[in-house]
Image (spheres, rainbow, N blue to C red):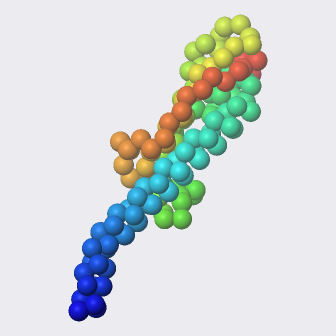
């Protein structure tokens, strides 16, 4: 009888274990996407010219930097360099978005900041 009750309890906890594993995978994906956003923001913060920010703008697929589970990400960086023709020093709005490469509609992480630029090039 005790083994039967133990078996019932084990089956009752199985869905909880499966749900925990699914949540762990989702959290790992979000953490990786957040790290990519943070890295792009740091690298863009080191650039102090409009030309440098324009070179950083675009879409990058990170197949080479896929995480341990094989998930690859698309990083889209947009710098609003239209304000670069004004006087210096000036600020340029920079936005970074990260989504899964296999599902472009799944926005995982995003951030927007202002970058100080001191010259056109």
Question: Which quarter of the rendered picture does the C terminus lie within?
Answer: top right
Q: Kindly identify the residue that appears in the image at 72 percent across and 20 percent down.
A: 117
| Foreground pick, 27 / 43 | 27
Q: Quadrant of the N terminus?
A: bottom left
Q: Can residue 31 be seen in this view?
A: yes
Image side of residue 62 versus residue 2, left or right:
right
Q: Is residue 60 visible?
A: no
111 or 94, which lies in front? Answer: 111
* Image x and y of residue 37, in percent: 57, 41
- Relative vertical location of residue 9 with respect to residue 49 in this rendering, above or below: below
- Where is residue 59 drawn, in percent x and y? 51, 39
Quadrant housing residue 65:
bottom right
Q: Position of residue 6 (x, y in %)?
A: 30, 85
Residue shown at the point (24%, 89%) measured from the top left = 4
Tally of numbered discs: 0
**Image position, residue 50 (x, y; %):** 68, 22
Tell which of 4 and 79 is nearer to you: 4
Q: In this view, does 44 lie above or below 7?
A: above
| Residue at the far top in the pictured view | 87
Up the image or down, 78 lies above or below 8; here it is above
Please tell me which residue is depicted at 70% across the width and 31% down the height of the picture: 45
């Amino acid at each position: 009888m005790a083994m039967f009750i133990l078996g019932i309890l084990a089956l009752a906890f199985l869905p909880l274990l499966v749900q925990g594993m699914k949540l762990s995978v989702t959290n790992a994906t979000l953490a990786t996407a957040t790290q990519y956003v943070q890295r792009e923001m740091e690298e863009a913060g080191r650039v102090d010219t409009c030309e440098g920010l324009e070179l950083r703008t675009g879409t990058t697929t990170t197949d080479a930097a896929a995480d341990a589970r094989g998930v690859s990400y698309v990083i889209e960086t947009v710098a609003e360099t239209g304000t670069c023709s004004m006087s210096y020093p000036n600020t340029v709005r920079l936005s970074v978005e990260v989504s899964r490469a296999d599902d472009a509609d799944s926005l995982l992480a995003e951030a927007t900041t202002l970058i100080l630029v001191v010259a056109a090039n």
